[in-house]
Image (cartoon, grey):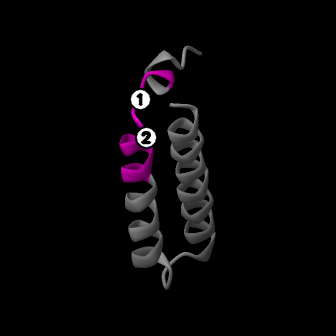
Amino acid sequence: MNFSSLKNASPMYFYFVSIVAFVLANLIRTTSIGVYYVLLIVGLVFFFLGLMRRIKK
């Protein structure tokens, strides 16, 4: 798999994806607990990816 598009993405893209994941997790929280935790983890991963990208620049 080629992740060149992720390597060239700006930190704002990662922050935006993490916010969307957190909002979706909040909306799905009462219906599916498993999807809720998956979206929380995805949100955290993308937040830290954005943070690391920001620190490197």
Image marks 1 and 2: residues in contact by CB distance under 8 Å? yes
Numbered label attached to residue 31: none
Q: Residue furthest bottom?
A: 30
Give residue 23's quadrant in the image.
Answer: bottom left
Residue 10, percent from left and from top: 39, 33
Q: What's the magenta bit mostly, secondary-structure-wise?
A: helix
Q: Is residue 39 above or below residue 49?
A: below
Q: Residue at x 55, y 47 (%)?
A: 51
Q: Nearer the viewer, residue 14 or 29?
A: 14
Q: Is residue 17 above or below residue 3?
A: below
Residue 3, percent from left and from top: 53, 20
Query: Dot 2 lies on which element?
Result: helix
Numbered label attached to residue 9: 1
Which residue matches tag 2? 11
Residue 10 painted magenta: yes
Q: Is residue 51 above or below residue 30?
A: above
Q: Nearer the viewer, residue 35 or 18?
A: 18
Residue 11 painted magenta: yes
Q: Residue at x 44, y 44 (%)?
A: 14
**Type of the residue with mark 1:** Ala
Query: Dot 1 lies on which element?
Result: loop
Residue 21, percent from left and from top: 45, 60
Give residue 56's quadrant in the image.
Answer: top right
Q: CA distance from mark 1 to mark 2?
A: 7 Å
Q: Is residue 9 above or below residue 49?
A: above
Instruction: Tell me where the magenta segment starts and ends, as one range.
Output: 7-17
Residue 6, percent from left and from top: 48, 27
Q: Residue at x 54, y 75 (%)?
A: 32
